[in-house]
Image: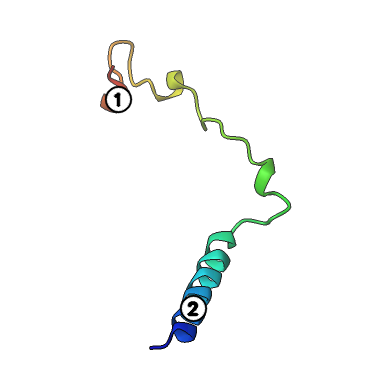
Amino acid sequence: MTLAEKLALVVLVTCACAVVSTASPLDPDRYFLVEAEPRAQLEDYRLNDDVWPTHYDI
């Protein structure tokens, strides 16, 4: 493999990585409008007065 072929392969792989990394299943116009917040508060997951889900144990 010549130097030119190696360089072409590096360029091809770099372009492929750039294309894949910029792809998003979300609508690009709404991508930055999504706010990161919980769907429910901790109190909404409460089972009883004395029982809490185990994944909230501290």
Kind of residue at disc 1: Pro
Could you say where residue 32 lies in the image, as x and y percent from the top left?
Answer: 67, 44
Residue in the picture at 28% in, 11% down: 50
Q: Which mark is residue 53?
A: 1
- Secondary element under disc 2, as helix, strand or loop, is helix
- Secondary element under disc 1, as helix, strand or loop, is loop
Distance from disc 1 to disc 2, alpha carbons, whole Å, reads: 55 Å
Q: Residue furthest top?
A: 49
Q: Is residue 57 visible?
A: yes
| Dots 1, 2 in contact, CB < 8 A | no
Could you say where residue 3 lies in the image, as x and y percent from the top left?
Answer: 45, 83
Judging by the rendered image, the residue that carries numbered circle 2 is: 7
Neighbours of disc 1 within 10 Å: few (<14), some (14-19), many (20+): few
Q: Quadrant of the C terminus?
A: top left
Residue in the picture at 55% in, 31% down: 37
On screen, residue 52 versus residue 33, left or right, reads: left
On screen, residue 19 versus residue 53, left or right, reads: right
Q: Residue furthest bottom?
A: 1
Could you say where residue 27 lies in the image, as x and y percent from the top left?
Answer: 67, 57
Residue in the picture at 37% in, 20% down: 46
Q: Is residue 9 above or below residue 38?
A: below
Which of the 4 image quarters holds residue 44?
A: top left
Could you say where residue 39 lies in the image, as x and y percent from the top left?
Answer: 52, 33
The one of 1 and 22 positioned closer to us in this rendering: 1
Q: Which mark is residue 36?
A: none
Earlier in the chain: of badge 1 and badge 2, it is 2
Q: Is residue 26 above or below residue 6?
A: above
